[in-house]
Amino acid sequence: MSFKTDIAGDFAAVVDGLEEVTLAPPDGLLGVQSVEVESALRRAVSKREAAASQGKYTTSDTAWHFPLSAGTPYLGGTITDGDGGEWRILEAHKETLSARWRCICRELAIIGGLDTYITIQKRTASKASDGSAVYTWAVYKVNMRARIQQEAAQREKEREQRTSRITGTVFFAEQVLLGEQYRIVAQDGTVWEITGDSQRDSITGLYTVSVERNT
């Protein structure tokens, strides 16, 4: 009899509550494209599993299941559901006779309180007719989900004018790898200059960018 083999190949046929998702690799992984997964199943991480992980996972995390043939999950990649929710892949392993993937994922946008959308602009340089450098800003990414946390203000005096230099941190679920040639424009039009970033290699934390602006 081939009972076990039949179970291994019948995931999409016998499981209810399946949905379409997009499986994407982490940023910077060359040669790997996003794929559409027609039959994926989401399940909560149990209290027992969360406790056994010793803090690595929580009951707010989600386990996504889909057939092995649908695609390959990569740590740090994402699963995007039909409502636009993005889930960072923290762990992936094979189950059911190696016919199904089980991915432990975390929706960083919710956990990190990412409550706004921002625009990222990139600076480009060109030469004027007199040979001097001319800088212009062009849109690099739009509608990036983020959280802007203002932290401190420092008063400065320049050319007899007093200004305040405000610093802050911007949190992202997506690692966009920004440098000083980029800047962030908030929904209200406020422009933040980027001074540094961190958490580039973290798959469990939020990608963070240090910023500052004048008032």
Image: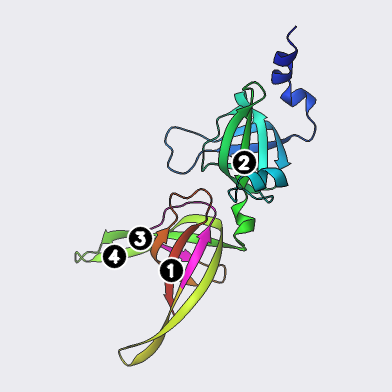
Q: Earlier in the sequence, mark 4 or mark 3?
A: 4
Left or right for 69, reference 31: right
Q: Residue, x 44% and y 49% (percent of image)? A: 201
Whether tag 4 and tag 3 are in contact, CB under 8 A, the answer is no
Instruction: Identify the residue under disc 2.
Output: 104
Label 3 or label 2, whichever comes before in sequence order: 2
Q: Which residue is mark 1?
A: 211
Q: Mark 4 vs mark 1: which is more N-terminal?
A: 4
Distance Cα–Cα, label 4 vs label 3: 14 Å
Q: CA distance from mark 2 to mark 1?
A: 32 Å
Residue 4, image quadrant: top right
Extreme residue in the bottom direction: 160
User: The disc labelled 4 sits on which kind of residue?
Assistant: Val
Position of 21 relative to 57 (above/below): above
Q: Secondary structure at mark 2?
A: strand
Circle 3: residue type: Gln
C-alpha span from label 3 to label 2: 35 Å
Q: Which mark is residue 134?
A: 4
Total label count? 4
Tag 4 secondary structure: strand
The magenta stretch is 168-184
